[in-house]
Image (spheres, grey):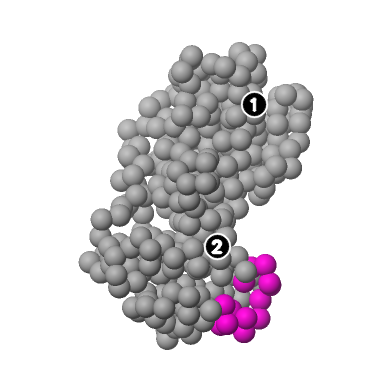
């Protein structure tokens, strides 16, 4: 067993994924879901699946909670070829971290014609805003990992709230059930799922903002005003600097690439910052935006603004209405 610091089932299911598609010469993502009642039930399915993959030349990664990881590791006999990743090193409130990490696993560990098999258990967080970030992630990876040789077995505790169990049903093309692997008739097209995923309300937006400019004419002056305001906030310096960078990126995008007028509103509260940046355009509608650089790995072409914002803030929510498009950034600390 190799440890990396990088970032409803029944007892007769030891071969539950046997009917799932095998890797072929042109492998891409396979994305299955499994809902379990007890951690031991995950091991009964996942361990034989991982060992079968290793025997066929696949790589194996486990990124689950500690209660689930223990039985899996015991069931695979602590095989040193199984890479165990600390769950929170991957599944944090910043979803691009996980996207980047799994792409790297695929690049570094997959051999030609084979996949990296991943048993993953997302930590959805404690708030509805946290939930939405990771609900979106489960849909996004069907697109973001499409060309990558990854086979994900995403495990969900049956005790999760129903909206999160609904995410399991709607974002995975394959399911592991009492009858083995089956195609999922409840699967929803990822773009449609993302467009329909509700954006939770932010109470601060109903209050007077600490800074507002609803028709930005002096972008440089606004940038200085945002910095001056954040310098008055009692918070960790790195968090404030990250938030400033994200706001600057989004305001720059709105002014340079959006339709005028562009506007910005920023709220502060103890341990929390929220900023909404809006422009009046109606044509932009990419539900996968910001989960990777807009122009791929070559960052010299730009297109990094929303991707950076997703890494720099706890939550990024994009909303569209008759007035245009807005991006809401929020972050917090204790």
For the record, the magenta segment spans 227-240
Residue 238 shown in magenta: yes
Q: Earlier in the sequence, mark 2 or mark 1?
A: 1
The residue lying furthest to the left in this view is: 322
Establish if 270 lies above or below 331.
below
Q: Which residue is mark 1?
A: 109
Residue 270, horizontal then vertical, whole percent: 60, 80
Element under label 1?
Answer: helix
Residue 12: quadrant of the picture = top right
Residue 95 shown in magenta: no
Residue 21: quadrant of the picture = top left
Residue 44, horizontal then vertical, whole percent: 61, 27
Asked whether, in this view, residue 198 is left or right of residue 18, the answer is left
- Could you give the CA–CA distance between mark 2 and mark 1, rounded to whole angstroms? 30 Å
- At 48% from the left and 75% from the top, the residue drawn is 220
Establish if 40 lies above or below 123.
above
Q: Which residue is mark 2?
A: 313
- Quarter of the figure that contains the N terminus: top right
Which label was assigned to residue 32? none
Q: Nearer the viewer, residue 306 or 88?
A: 306
- Quarter of the figure that contains the C terminus: bottom right
Element under label 2?
Answer: loop
- At 29% from the left and 65% from the top, the residue drawn is 259
- At 30% from the left and 73% from the top, the residue drawn is 261
Please tell me how crowded label 1 is: few (under 14), some (14-19), or many (20+) other residues with Cα within 10 Å. some
Residue 2 in view (yes/no): yes
Marks 2 and 1 close (CB-CB < 8 Å) = no
- At 34% from the left and 78% from the top, the residue drawn is 215
Establish if 199 lies above or below 70.
below
Establish if 298 lies above or below 163.
above
Asked whether, in this view, residue 228 is left or right of residue 138, the answer is right
């Amino acid at each position: 067993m190799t440890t990396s610091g990088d970032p409803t089932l029944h007892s007769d299911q030891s071969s539950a994924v046997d009917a799932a598609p095998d890797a072929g010469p042109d492998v891409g993502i396979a994305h299955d879901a499994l809902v379990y009642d007890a951690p031991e039930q995950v091991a009964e399915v996942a361990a034989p699946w991982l060992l079968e993959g290793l025997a066929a030349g696949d790589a194996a990664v486990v990124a689950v909670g500690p209660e689930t990881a223990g039985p899996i590791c015991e069931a695979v006999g602590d095989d040193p070829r199984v890479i165990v990743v600390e769950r929170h090193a991957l599944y944090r409130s910043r979803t691009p971290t996980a996207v980047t990490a799994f792409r790297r696993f695929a690049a570094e560990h997959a051999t030609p014609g084979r996949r990296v098999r991943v048993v993953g258990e997302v930590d959805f967080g404690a708030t509805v805003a946290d939930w939405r970030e990771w609900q979106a992630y489960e849909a996004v990876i069907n697109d973001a990992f499409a060309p990558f040789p990854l086979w994900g077995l995403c495990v969900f505790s049956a005790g999760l709230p129903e909206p999160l169990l609904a995410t399991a049903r709607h974002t995975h093309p394959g399911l592991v059930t009492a009858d083995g692997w089956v195609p999922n008739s409840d699967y929803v097209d990822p773009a449609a799922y993302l467009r329909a995923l509700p954006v939770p309300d932010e109470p601060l937006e109903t209050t007077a903002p600490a800074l507002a400019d609803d028709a930005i004419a002096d972008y440089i002056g606004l940038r200085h005003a945002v910095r001056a305001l954040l310098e008055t906030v009692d918070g960790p310096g790195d968090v404030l600097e990250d938030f400033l960078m994200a706001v600057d990126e989004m305001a720059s995008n709105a002014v340079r690439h959006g339709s005028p007028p562009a506007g910005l509103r920023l709220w502060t509260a103890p341990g929390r910052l929220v900023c909404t940046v809006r422009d009046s355009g109606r044509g932009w509608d990419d539900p996968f935006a910001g989960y990777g650089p807009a122009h791929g790995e070559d960052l010299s072409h730009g297109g990094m603004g929303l991707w950076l914002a997703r890494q720099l803030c706890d939550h990024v929510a994009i909303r569209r209405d008759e007035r245009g498009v807005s991006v809401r950034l929020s972050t917090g600390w204790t």
